[in-house]
Amino acid sequence: MASVRRTVQIHRPPEDVWAHIGDPASIATWFPGIEAATVEGTRRVITTRSGLPIPEVIVTHDDLQRRFQYRLDLPLVSSHLGTIDVIGLEDGSSLVVYSTDCEPDPLAIVIGGATGGALAEIRRQLEPRTGGAA
Amino acid sequence: MGRKILFVTTDQQRYDTLGCNGGTLARTPVVDRLAADGIRYTRAVPQSVVCMPSRSTIVTGQHPSTHGVWMNGVALPVDAPSVAAELHRAGYRTALVGKAHFEPFIDPFGRFTENLLAGGEAETAQTAWADGTIGPHRGFDHLEFAAHGAVGMLHYARWIAVNHPEASGMYYAAVDAALNVNSAGGGDTDAPQVKVNPIPREWYHTEWVADRTIAWLDSLAADDDWFCWMSFPDPHHPWDPPEAEMERIDWRDVPLPAGYPTDRAEREAILDAKPRHWRQWYDGTLVSNYEAPRGWVPASLTDDQVREVNARNAVECELIDEALGRVLAAIEARGWGDDVDVIFTTDHGELQGDFGLLFKGPYHVDALMRLPLVWRPAPSAGVAPAVIDQPVGLIDLAPTFAAIAGLPARDWMHGHTLPADAAEVAARPVEHVLTEWDSELFGVGVYLRTITRPGWVCTAYKPGYVHDGTEGELYDLEHDPLQRTNLWDDPGYASIRSDLLAELHDHEPPVHQPRLELDAPV
């Protein structure tokens, strides 16, 4: 099992960040490489830019903790847990943590790389004047 | 009208695989002729011994620390400096045909331009350049990509899928179902990354790269200036050339390489005298490079497997040489022969049996660090043939391309124009070449800094997963050409070691900020 963690600080209150990304169906608007997402109950299916549909199981959707967790549901993936946490900081800004725990290990690097791109895009959208990489 | 440039790279090719460098297995008359007519470098050194950092050095003219691609899987920023952009701006038509690999291959989200281009109609994409302007992707106005097989999103794989779908499964599967580099064996000896490939030669990627290069050249006007980077994916593993071509060399007749100690006890004693990650990989207890198959233990390597790998590798080198010959004939047919500079090299070497190892990793020895490099200047330039023994680097290519085109080297290029004769060797501002290795793979961090000077190569290890920062390697290249005796801790060489380390530290290249993230395993 490999674990990859990406983080970004966003100079917006956590409730604003969560409002932007907390809806599981919104992922295609802030995750580069995901073209579409449909949600039915605890099932979500995303479609990547390369045309690959990926079914997922929503594990946690907690608006109070501002935490979202999901698992990829693919034969290739023996184990996966993706976790997004939005954490309020003392200065009023937010720390967004996007963690990937995955087996097979190499896939964790691939997904982790993509989550880094997602965090950069979230910051670009919420801090349009600064942008920046995750 | 200026001099045109055909830049030819192979992937993971050893210095000693060319006849002009003393190789006796592969017949390489085309490159040998270029060497006889031009300049042959006997100590060309990469700035990284893996693909993405090394190729990024070629196009930017910078060390890995500076361009930021510190290991495979880290994408070169789209706005990185590019010598191709300089040439394009100067009016050159610019193309890259074959293997680019400035951006990761494993890309299910379709995040990277190289992987998306083949699915569109465009020859290239418009992206940001280092100066903030928008132009062809990395300065190449024509891009057609291939990799080591027929699976994936690149042009060659799509060409196979459309025109010869039955061939897509003929190649060795480079990665397994778990996305690890495949350790499955094949051929006659069950060697890793070896497969009997029934693909007809005319469908093989080496032929495709040459065909597409010729097609692009044919599209140009007679008076165009052009820079064409023709980039063959071979002889990088998997070793699966068209099986019909294996009639050229019977692996049973292949002599074992000089770098392969046949006596196991001797081999292991040599490894034990090097920093501990050498022996740990050999024993299968530590894998620090993704491209070393995790399921393969080097200690299991047999003499016959070394022979078969070398035979298949040599056939791949011969196919490249013949493909290059076809391209040169096409250039002659266009009437450009006198005005074309040809530079032939590779991105890094291959262990290929040395020390009982295959593939590559954090091992800064000749197998990976001594590269074939031949520059045949345009005959119209009147440059005399020469052999240059002074260490030079792939970092020197970008300013050399600029010089051929009559352009000044830009200040972001950190290399120096390749010397063409003894006077230019004497005028070079530095005598050394630097090489770096950084890798962080599933918690295993390995960091090397190496300096090559005439007669010496010295590697310092930074603290990491298995090193405490005191380890190193020092080799006397004249008296120990196989780098079997590590002089790092020999008191008799303390002064030389100290001098080399001082020079290494005094010339550490600028560091890219912020550190770029790892986006994929390769």
Image (tube, coloured by chain):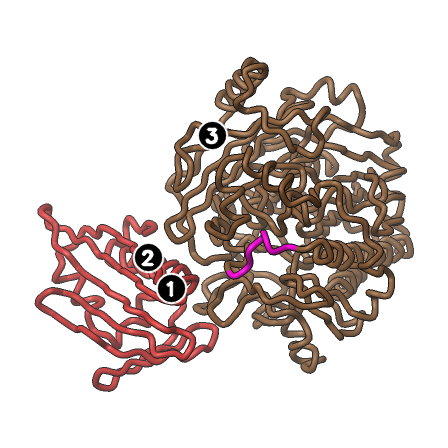
Whether residue B220 is visible to the viewer of this picture, yes or no, is no
Chain that appears red: A
Depth check, mark 3 against mark 2: the one in front is 3
Q: CA distance from mark 1 to mark 2?
A: 9 Å
Q: Quadrant of the N terminus of chain B?
A: top right
Which of the two discs, 1 and 2, labels the residue nearer the N terminus? Answer: 2
Up the image or down, B235 lies above or below B259; here it is below
**Circle 3 chain:** B
Up the image or down, A111 lies above or below B418; here it is below
Looking at the rendered structure, the kind of residue marked 3 is Glu
Asked if labels 2 and 1 touch by Cβ distance under 8 angstroms, the answer is yes
Q: Would residue B416 be counted in the magenta stretch? A: no
**Circle 1 chain:** A
User: Which label is found at residue A4?
Assistant: 2
Q: Which residue range is magenta in the image?
A: B295-301
In the rendered image, residue B380, in percent from the top left (x then y), is placed at: 88, 37
Q: Which residue in the structure is indicated by mark 3?
A: B471
Specify the farthest residue to the bottom: A40
Looking at the rendered structure, the kind of residue marked 2 is Val
Tell me what hue chain B is rendered in: brown
Name the side, left or right, on which B390 lies relative to B101.
right
